[in-house]
Structure formats: structure tokens, C-alpha cells
Image (cartoon, coloured by chain):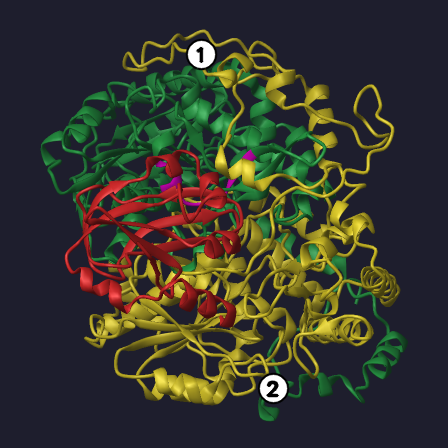
Chain colours: A red, B green, C yellow
Amino acid sequence: MSVKYTKDHEWAREDGGVYVVGISAHAAEQLGDVVFVELPEVGKTLSKGDDMAVVESVKAASDVYAPISGEIVAVNQAIADEPAKVNEDAAGAAWFVKIKPSDAGELDALMDEAAYNEFVENE
Amino acid sequence: MRYLPLNDADRTAMLAAIGAAKIDDLFEDVPADSLNATFDLPDHLGEMEVERALGAMAAKNRAAGEGPFFIGCGAYAHHVPATVDHIIQRSEFLTSYTPYQPEIAQGTLQYLFEFQTQVAALTGMDVANASMYDGSTGCAEAALMARRVTKRKKVILSGALHPQYAAVTRTNLELHNDNVIQAPINTGAAEDLASMIDDETSCVIVQNPDVFGNIRDLTPIAEAAHAKGALLVAVVTETVSLGAIKSPGEMGADIVVGEGQSIGNGLNYGGPYVGLFATRQKYIRQMPGRLCGETTDAEGKRGFVLTLSTREQHIRRDKATSNICTNSGLCTLAFTVHMTLLGEAGLRRLAMLNHDIAGKAADALGAVTGVEIVNKSYFNEFTLRLPKNASAVVDTLAKEGVLAGVPGGRLWPDDPAAENLLIVAATERVTEGDIETFALKLREAL
Amino acid sequence: MSMNTQGRPTRADGAALSDTPTFTGNKALQIEEALSFEIGDVARTGVDLAEPTGGAHRLGGLHRDSDIGLPGLTEPETMRHFVRLSQKNFAIDMGPFPLGSCTMKHNPRLNEKVARLPGFGDLHPLAPQSAVQGALELIDRLAFWLKELTGMPAVAMSPKAGAHGELCGMMAIKSALDARGEGSKRTRVLAPESAHGTNPATAVQCGFTVEPIPADSTGRVDLGALKEKLSDDIAGIMVTNPNTCGLFERDIRAIADAVHEAGGYFYCDGANFNAIAGKVRPGDLGIDAMHINLHKTFSTPHGGGGPGSGPTVLSDALAPFAPVPYVVHENGVFHLVETRRAAKAETSGADSMGRLTAFHGQMGMFVRALAYMMSHGVDGVRQAAEDAVLNANYVLARLKTEMTPAFDGFCMHEALFDDRFLEGTGVETIDFAKAMIDEGYHPMTMYFPLVVHGAMLIEPTESESKRELDLFCNALLSLAKRAKAGEVEPFKAAPIYAPRRRLDETAAARNPVLKWRPEAQAAE
């Protein structure tokens, strides 16, 4: 299943009817050493673009936005406990949340990997 | 001008190096008709002349040390050891900046770490920040923090909270159209705050000892607040009291704010003072203000840095927990030095000495005919109910050289119930002679 | 997510150039010092107080029985502890402290002396007004100087620091909008991206929302773009002038006119007033409110992060909403107006915003600032502004041979550089700044303002002599040349000679240790 990206550097990947969401490796690198992650509560309903989580390095605090609308069905407590994981494996083990989408069609508007890489290149 | 090192030859040479013909070329962006405005202000003066002019103004004031003195209500006349004032005037402390370059600011950072440790211990809380402006602004910040933590918009203020603290809190919360409920004046520590707390309440703010000097058991209020998901904010305006009475932390407070002036800082006609701010570990990311934390340097040596700065305005900007930047740096140093000199043994002794002297003052004043002491308990401050308007009595005694305390009319000018109240503080600076004089003059004035 | 790629690297890496270790860890005059908690004990004290005899029976049964955990030190131990700590700090009295936007100027000791006169230092804020006439006179006198220097009709004296002054000004704007019946409609505040973080934080604390004002290619407000953002929901703008790029907003009158025409107010951040005090009255430029940092412009000491003092001047439109308390003057007698109700009576009906702090503001700072102003006189204040601007331009002119100014032309009181001159060297702004420490200087402000890449903001102030500036510039030019010559290692390792090497801020933030704990507890 392909990964989709937002212009705000979140990614989403389908996994058995829900979407796993995280931030891109590029974003993690730009942030520097991540020191804190705040995750939403399971059960919370978000619209696309809503503030979903917070990720902080020493020098910056960034909001992570929901890439698609839906309900939070799981959060990755491991990254809250050990924020350094975000720097180690942003694209994989350091996912943020799982969202049960209310409109999976929203994914179509996002970029695929090649488009995202080009976007980052030109940013 | 003695403070300006450049002379005219320097200025000419520098303008040439810059490539400007005259100084005003450098101000070329200023609208020409507003440059070099004229002012109705005098020219420079020598050191002696300035000292003379300001000395004349100072001489028109009556300092606490000039005679019998019993004023408190949020600012207390304590003795400050000479060592404190010497240390805070060392160039390296006095003329340094906020420790943004930690490698060359370890002196400041280490005392901030010691300060945070001292404040946490005194208040009985997990963590304290590196200071607020003063107790009153800290009180407003605590209410704003409780709002962030609970996401509720109703605050309950005790009727024995210093009215100026209440006013500052109200001013800040009204900006957000929050519901600020002020309990009526209660001189006898008998208010029923618990029944006012509901599911909408973000916090209840209670002072201890309260503004009338009563010592409050905060435990039932903490329990009532927690039962409704609200926080208890405890306010301490007399930090020395924490050497004698149970800490707010021991009684269940969630946020403790304090005025630290009593430790190491002079009266200074109201400022600069030092706001103490402490809370539970779980709320640290909602705290306002700077925090100093321990770490190591590239060689593995222990050192200190400002930390968790992402809460603050210079990083979080419009989403910061507070707009505070400059705090009370040098006043925190004065606090830290004095507290280090005192130590636990000295603080406890100082506190109980204050209590002794207040007891003697209360006994002497309570024996004056027509005077009633409203308190059942007190630390170093208590309230008298006089048979007549206390403001007039204070003015009369001031003419006799006795600064007798704070009349109710000064703090609650709109409340007739406060008219005859006189709030009296007695610190270790008060002598038995002062008490005798006060009692004598009070008897004459009534 | 919102991306913030500005800011500074924070990891303490870099090769450790180690010298021969000593047994104590001391390096001659650099003496290691433990925490007071590790030196003292709870029975030790540095004060001699009489034995209390009265007991705790009036404490209502709430006597503190538990251990507090506050070790004490005797007086000589205390003195040594804090003197050793002091020697780990850099200070203005030691050398140039060119932190842009911070105005680290000389702090005259006369100011310290007069602030400690018992009539000021030992004066109670709630003493009867008959006993504080000299204090009220001083506040009134300082207020006169501030109003005169700014050309503004009113000043609120009680704000405790610059950010508190911002709050005062923005609250006055909110009050004025409420009085016009437009408080709920006008909620947008505009502020440049180059603004201090306090500006957006303050606006939000007042219940406004904040949007950026675009900058033009010369580092100033883009007037055309600003006008497009103005509409009938604008509460006001917050603009620093001179701005944080060290430049005077040359369109300031047009900016003020445009905002007023749109029905909003103009808050001017006065952090950089030192550049124009005695030269220009901000009141002549159309502003409605401005705070004045007495701890910047008027030399009250920064004290390692405070106390500050932020009196805020107000226009006729905002003055009726000034906070309480304030001083009024009648027939040679000074009075305090202390409550909203009293203010309403005194101003024939206007609604004061209320109270910003207990008591009357930073009196200790007022005394120092007035001593500074009287010493300088208006002639000296003007000369100080001119010298501050001259010094900054001299630094700009000398350094531009090796470093890259962020903008063309003259600057005001501070010179802004970016990191283009370091491109390809492997040295970054933070390394350059830390290398300055080894040369005996406090670094300039780095990575601020955010609108310039790798910003270095140098504010020498008027307190530096030409000789001191020449040495400083020579040192920076030498560093720039060394960086370009490929000497990366000493920069990455810097500072080498400071009391500490680079500190690991990441570890501090990941696992916050905010107070000392006994070893047994800390190990848990």
C-alpha cells in the first residue's frame, strides 16, 4: 500500500481499514532532536487539517495536523515515552496515530512519494 | 557626559569610516520634520547634584526603620543581611543578561536551580519555576494555567484573598470573558468555598495566611475542588510563614503562588519583588515562565540550562503559556542568598520569632479598650476591629510617628464592612518598645 | 504540521580538546562549585537570631512538623559559594555584551546607591499617602520625563516589565474598542514575523488573534501588503520601531494613518527606543501606545534576567482606560487613585482596564531610571542615542568586509548580519557565536529575528569606546577569515576556555531535572 503525504509533512498509509499517520523523515530531520510528543486521546474525532498532535525539539514546537478526517483509534505511546524514536524512524516505527477515516476519498488529494520528494526539493 | 566614552574626535573619525557626512545622515529614514524634536527637559547633572535631588525626595518619605512600624498586607519589613546586598551588587550578577549563553552564565543558572529547589521545598510542591514578576501577577498566571489544565472558565476567589491580587486576577481573566466569582469579605476564616465549587469551576484561589492573618486549613477545600475536577491555587504573601505552618503542598494545593519579597528583598515601595510559582510534576508543560534544568556539557561535566522553552513566547509565540519574558532575576538571587544563609534551622527560628512578636503585639493591642482581635489563629499578622474608622486612626498615629497597619478602607474602599478593620503585621524588626508605643498611641487615638 | 526550520542547533557535539586535568577539577581562577544543597546541612545557619520562646499555640493547629529540606550555610561559606558562582558569569562590566535588541549598556552605580536610600528602599507600598509624598513625587517626575521624551499625553507606570507593558497597551486597545461597542467585532491584530515573541503571545493573552504583516525586501513593513490586510475587524497592529532588523520604519506615518483609517490602533513596541530617545518623539509618528523598557533604554540593570520595568505611554484615545493605580497632583499634594471606581470618578466616567499588579510597579527601577535621566539630561539622552547609532554603524561598516549584512544601507542602533559569509565553510552561526566566547566576548543575539537566515544581531550600545569596538571588530574579522580558511574544528569545539563546554540541551529537555534531589531519591 502506498504512502501519501501532505504539504505539512504528515504521511498516511492504509493498514487494514484504518490509516497509520506520522510525520516525514524530512520533517523530523528539520526539527532536530525531538524531545517531546503530545498525542490526542483515543476516540477523538478530527477534521482534516485540525491540530492533531504536538512535536517539540529544543528549538521548535510544531503542531501536527490531521491529514484526513476521522476518529483516532490508536496512538503510539512509545514515541511519547521516548521521543527520540521520531528521529530514528519517522517513516516507520515512530508513527503517531491510527485514524479510522470518515471519508477515505480525502486521501486522493494528497501527494504520492515522488510528488512529496519533489515538493520538499522545491520548498 | 561621564557615561559616554566617545569624544568628538572619535565621532568624526567613525563617521568618516562609515561614509557619512554627519550624524543625522544615519537617521535618514526618520521623517525629517520629526527629527531633533525639542523637549521641555533639563540638561545633564553631576553625580553630586543628582544624589542631592533624589535624596531630597527620599527624605520626604517615612521609611519603615524610622519608628514603630506595623504595615504588612503583602509586603513585609524584614531584616536583610548585609551579605545579601553585597552579593547581588557583584558586577557578574548585576550586569549580566538572561542566561541565553549557558557556557558563560553558569553562575546565574546554578542559583536559579537552587532557587527552584528551595521554592519547591518551601511550598511542598514538585517543581517551581525561575520566578514571576511578583505574587499578584503570579496569582493571575495561576488562574490562567488552571484554565489551560481544566479547560474551564470559572474561577472562585476567596473573600480573604488580598483584594489587589483579586483585582489583578480579575483584570486578566475578564479579557477572556471568564466568570470570576468573588466570595464576600470574610474576616474569620469561616467562608464556605466548597459549596461554591461546581463542574464548571477551573480553580478556587485561597490565600494562607489569609489577608486578615488567619491560618487556613486548605485540606477540605482541596478535597472539595478535586471532587469536582477543579484545582486549588494557594496564595502565600508572607513566605516566612512557610517556616512555621504546614505547606500548601501538604494540604493538597495544585498550584502555589507566593510573594517572595520577605526573603532577601527590601520593601522598595512595592517593587521589584519576586513571584514564586510552584506546581505538581504533571502540570509542568502548562507552567508559565522560565525553567532551569540540569544537564551535562561536552566533557560530561554537570551544568545548567534554560529548558522546556517551547512553552515560552520566544518559541511558541501566539501559543505560548504566557507572554512573560524578563522576570525577577536579581530578586531571585537575593531570595536564594538569604534562604541559604537562613537554612532550615534559621528559617524556622525566624518564623517563630515573628510569631512570638506578633503574639506580644496582639496581646498588648487587644488589651486596649474597645479593640477586638478578629483572629482565632495567626502567624505574624492579625486584624483588629476598632470602635471607629480605622483610616482616621492610622492617619492620627502616622502623625505621632507610628505606622500602625493597613486600614480596611484602603483595601476595600467600597465596602463599609471593612471600615473599622486594621490589619497589623509584626516582624522580627519590631521591638517591645515599638509595641508599647503603638498600644499607648492607639489608646489615645480611640 | 507547521515547520520551523529556523533556530539554533542544540546538541553538544564537537571534538573535546582536553587539557591536563587537575585533581580538583579547578582551573586556576575557575573554581568548581557544588550546589548549596550538597555543601550545607539543615542544622547549619548563617544568621544569629534570638531563641523563640512563645510556642506555636496561635497557629491554629497547623504547625509545620515535617522536614522542609533546606540546608543552610554559614556566612563565610555563603559568601564563597556565591562569589564562586558569580565568576562563572559574563557581564557588561567585564566587556562588550552586544546582544541585539537587549541594550546592554553601562549600569551606573549612583543609581544603585540612591535606590537604596531608606526613603525609597525601606518604604512600604501601603504606608499612608502622607508618608510617601516623596515617592509619589518621584513617580510623577519620571512620568513627566517619559511623556516628554515620547511626546505622549499619558503614561501607565505600573507594568512590571516590557511584556507586561505590552499587555497594558493591548488591554487599553481592547478597552477602547469595547467602549466603542466594537470589542467583539475587532479581534485581529497584525504583527511582523520579525517581532519579538512577546508580541503575538501578548495579543493572544488579550483574546485577540494574530496574523503576520509581510516585510519588504529592505527589511521593513510592506505598506501595500499591510493595507490589504486591514479591514473592519482589525483591532490594531504591533510594530517595533526601530524594528528588530535594526531599521527605522520609514513609512511609519503612513502605517499609522492606514491603521487609524481602518479603525484600529497602533501599538509600538518600544524595546529599541534607545536608538531615538531625545531625537524623535514617537508621539509625533502617530502611535497609540508604547512600552518603554527602563532596563534597556534607561540603564536599570538586567540582573541576569530581571527585574524589568515597562511603563507604557498612551495616546489621548487610550489614556482614559489606563490601569490603576496612578498618581494625581493637586496643590502641591500627590494622591493615588487606586481603584476602578475612583478612576471612574476622577476621569469623569471612563472605565479603567483595572489593575495589572499589586501596589505601584517597579519603584526601585523608577529611582534608578530617573537618576540616569537626570545624570544624562536631555542633551545626554540625545547624545547617547546618537552614539548608540554611530557605534552600530561603525561596527556594520567595519565588519561588512568579511561578514554579510542582511540589508543594504545604514542601520540604527543594531547591525544585522546573516550567515551567507559562512556558506560552505561548515561553520554555522552558533559555532561563530561560541567562538566569540573564547575570544572573551558575549555573543551577539543569534537566530533572531527569524526573517534572516542564521541571523547575528549586534547592538554595541553607546557604552563602548572606539578602542573597544576596534578590538571587537578585529576579533570578529579574524574569526570570519579563519572560518573561510577552513579552520572548522576550533569553531565546532568552542567554547573551549569557558567554565563549561557546550551543554546538552536535548538531554535537559527530554528528561527534565528541575530541582536538586538527594542522591538516593535521584537514583530512583
Q: Where is residue B114 drawn, in percent x and y?
A: 57, 29
Residue under label 1, please give it.
Answer: C67
Q: Is B284 covered by the magenta stretch? A: yes
Disc 1: host chain: C
Q: Where is residue B73 drawn, in percent x and y?
A: 37, 36
Query: What residue span does the magenta drawing correspond to?
Result: B283-293
Residue C141 is drawn in which quadrant? bottom right
Which residue occupies the foreground of this view, B125 or B139? Answer: B125
Secondary structure state at the residue bearing disc 1:
loop
The residue sitting at 39% across, 26% down in the picture is B125
Tag 2: amino acid: Val
Name the quarter where the N terminus of chain C is drawn: bottom left
Q: Where is residue B420 drawn, in percent x and y?
A: 23, 37
Secondary structure state at the residue bearing disc 2:
loop
Q: Where is residue C410 drawn, in percent x and y?
A: 70, 81
Left or right of residue C288: residue C58: left
Residue under label 2, please give it.
Answer: B30
Q: Residues within 10 Å of mark 2 (few under 14, many from 20)?
A: many
Furthest-bottom residue in this view: B33
